[in-house]
Amino acid sequence: MQLLSGGSQLRSIPADSFYTGLSLSPELSGSFFDGALSLRWGSIKRDWGPGLNNLMLSTDARSFDGVDIQVDFAPWLHYSVITGSLGKFSLDTLDGNPFFSDDYQQDKPYYRFDNNFSAHRVELDVGNLLTLSIFESTVWQKRFEIGYLNPLAIYMFQQNNLGDIDDVFAGLDFSFTLPSTARFYGAMGMNEMNVVGNPITMLKAPRNMFAFQAGFVVPIPVGSFSSLTVQWTYIGPFVYTHYPIMEKTGVLEDLADDDTNNTTVTDFENTYEIVAVGADTMLYKNLNSKGDYDWVIDVTDKYPEYTSPDGRTVIEGADGLYHIYETSSETAYVNKGENIGYPLDPNSQEFLVQLDLGLPKGWTAQLQTKYQVRSGQYGFMIEQFMNYSDDDNYQEKNFWDNEFKRTLSMQMKATKKFSDMPIELTAGYRFTVVWEKPVTSGDIPYDGRGVTFGPWNDPIFDHIVQIGAKVFF
């Protein structure tokens, strides 16, 4: 909130003026039975997995309040579980793009993103070198759901029992360490797997929503605890997404050809009006005395069978009536508008190289280079979702023939800690260059399918400088 402007919220990032804010992260924690049982309740950063950021729960994800439990059943068998309450971060735009979240003022009390998050992870140490893990998580609507609160439940079974209204993500990972030489790791996650058989067929099947990560870490003989990390990450189309939950919000009677002015107030407390505007037919919702409306849809030549471009309003004709369905809730894999898992758009790949240096006298430094590529075949935005009833008509995945955005970024950061003062200074610089093809097909459909792009634009360059200080007390 804007502390100097009566508590008003920030509307976009980067901010267009000087901004003041406040952050509060209370935490309670305890350890029992010589560390075999740990409990924690708080809003903290979490990073579950062997990589730099991870597929299920990443350190770059916005923090959320949750209860964490970690149990060591044996020195070689570890179990972690968390259940938390996801939040909202009310922005209009982030880096110039629409922000996928609720608006504090406009949406309440009808929040679409009103979700909890549950996850668990089992780690098995095979000797001293190899660790194998299996994990599962779910974003689920805020309700008293015993199945997701049970720390030993299997979320996929519970989701199926409830009718697939929640977003489940599951996978495997490993870490193999050669002492003083290197650590190798890899991970695979999925939202859904519909086709099983030949590995190549499985990888190309549109409804197999896979994510992969692989990398290695090598110690560097410079300073203390210095290392070089090389990592590749792939987030497939529709990974982290979920179709919205719809509810019937209105029913219109069958209209005669000349009956273009018709207002119907339904039992669902919504007002709809069909209005002829020239040669077009428009459907308005919730007109009031000021002439404002919640939304307006062009239903010319589409009425009554219609789906809005974003897929979140549907009109269906049946039994001489026109049934209107609107989105009531969203369970995409996001918290406060940003990804809970790896911070990369669906249908993208990233190649990362990072050098971490521990230097004398309290200095640390980090050099990082990332090259990211996005494919525009379908499912390339987290708000997009697959039409399961039409999944046979999606083409096989073809990542490299549908590129539309490439991003190269290079970042340098340095930190200085003082031994005699509770102060930490930080400074950083990031250079970014983006190549992108513009969208030429008008509205982007809800699944991203059929989008056409123009030729590559000239590169866009950006420079970001950050300085800061932390004072501990």
Image (cartoon, rainbow, N blue to C red):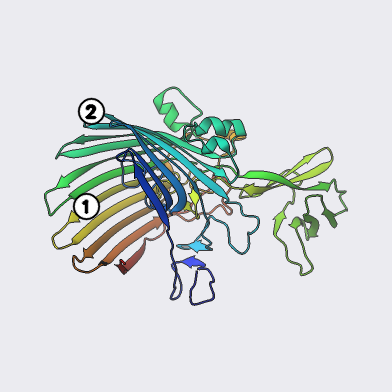
Q: Is residue 139 visible?
A: yes
User: Residue shown at 78%/55% (left/top)?
Assistant: 272
Q: Which residue is mark 2?
A: 127
Within 10 Å of disc 1 (Cα), the crowding (few <14, some 14-19, many 20+) is some
Where disc 1 sits, the SS reads strand
Residue sitting nearer the eye, 73 or 34: 34
Q: Which residue is mark 1?
A: 355
**What amino acid does circle 1 point to?**
Leu
When the figure is inspected, residue 230 is found, relative to residue 443, above or below; the finding is above
Q: Is residue 237 visible?
A: no
Residue 242: % across, % down: 55, 42
**What amino acid does circle 2 point to?**
Gly
Residue 172: % across, % down: 37, 33
Within 10 Å of disc 2 (Cα), the crowding (few <14, some 14-19, many 20+) is few
Residue sitting nearer the eye, 94 or 348: 94
Residue sitting nearer the eye, 217 or 311: 217
Quadrant occupied by the C terminus: bottom left
Residue 129: % across, % down: 22, 32
When the figure is inspected, residue 307 is found, relative to residue 465, above or below; the finding is above
Where disc 2 sits, the SS reads loop
Residue sitting nearer the eye, 357 or 33: 33
Residue 374: % across, % down: 42, 48
User: Residue shown at 58%/54% (left/top)?
Assistant: 442
- Residue at the extreme front: 33
When the figure is inspected, residue 156 is found, relative to residue 298, above or below; the finding is above
Which label is found at residue 122? none
* Mark sitting earlier along the chain (2/1): 2
User: Residue shown at 79%/68% (left/top)?
Assistant: 289
* 2 or 1: mark nearer the eye: 2
How far apart are labels 2 and 1 at the CA level? 29 Å
User: Residue shown at 43%/37% (left/top)?
Assistant: 120
